[in-house]
Image (cartoon, grey):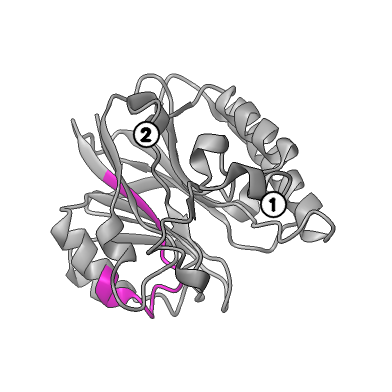
Amino acid sequence: MWEIVQAMRIATWNINSVRVRLGHLLNFLKRQDVDTILLQEVKCTTDAFPKEVLEDAGYNCLVFGQKSYNGVAILSKHRMECTKFGSEVFEGDEQARYVEAFVGGFTIASVYVPNGQDVELPAYPYKLKFLKTLRNYLSHRMTDEKFIIGGDFNIARADIDVYNPKAWHGKVCCTDAERELFQDILDTGLHDTHRELVESETAYTWWDYRHGGFAKNYGLRLDYFLATSNVKVERCTVDLEERAKERPSDHAPVIADVE
């Protein structure tokens, strides 16, 4: 029988190497009392993921890893069922960028969208193809279930999500094509949980390691929770404390309380 919960605190975090920042992760999970967390860029194979340590902390682990690069995971205090991996969605793509499970009454997916690097490089059309495939999958995936997809989308959805829109205009993460595909994904039946709660608040989730990006708040909002309308979201915030630590990820976690 499937486990159903009334409410859940979920987080998403591009952790930029789970083994390097395992201590940060354990501290964050305890400090924020997180029920379920979606991770991106775990940067290790599935076998090398620190599963035992996280299980000892009370979390079940669903991992789709890749050596040195990419890799996504879902960790939850609740049982995970009906799992799906990116290789089942992105046919022929060997990169580990998507994992999905039924958790406590919600279908939850962790996604790591390619960065794209530069509009002149092959990585950019790969990114657009990935987004189109994701959109097509989600358009057929939507039912009356509670569905949440969180992760690093590597897109600043609008100018409010960019510290300097003029300087970033036309660059990867801020191109019209990427933003249009992001909107296409929303149009499958999802809403941007943070922007729905706070229409005009600036809240970045990524800051470059270089040039004092975090200290100067030169950031972009690249990390999101998108949810179907039957998911009630009480809160969606960015945890800046993790980004301020020594040897942090360049992304901060996003936390949402849902029911």
Specify the amino acid type for callout 1: Val
Which residue is painted at 41% across and 65% down in the image?
Answer: 15
For disc 2, the marked residue is 201
Q: Is residue 61 visible?
A: yes
For disc 1, the marked residue is 172
* Residue range (magenta): 10-24
Specify the amino acid type for callout 2: Glu
- Left or right: residue 133 versus residue 211 is right
Answer whether residue 11 is magenta in the image. Answer: yes
* Residues packed near mark 2 inside 10 Å, few (<14), some (14 to 19) or many (20 plus): few
Which residue is painted at 25% across and 76% down in the image?
Answer: 23
Q: CA distance from mark 1 to mark 2?
A: 23 Å
Q: Looking at the image, do the residues carrying marks 1 and 2 touch, with CB atoms under 8 Å apart?
A: no
Image quarter hosting the C terminus? top left
> Above or below — where is 3 with respect to 69?
above
- The residue closer to the viewer here, 43 or 85, is 43
Which residue is painted at 38% across and 80% down in the image?
Answer: 20
Image quarter hosting the N terminus? top left
Q: Is residue 83 visible?
A: no
Answer whether residue 206 is magenta in the image. Answer: no
Closest to the camera, between mark 1 and mark 2, is: 2
Q: Which mark is residue 257?
A: none
Q: Secondary structure at mark 1?
A: loop
Residue 59 coordinates in the image, percent (x, y): 24, 61
* Residues packed near mark 1 inside 10 Å, few (<14), some (14 to 19) or many (20 plus): many
Residue 169 coordinates in the image, percent (x, y): 69, 44
Which residue is painted at 41% across and 25% down in the image?
Answer: 145
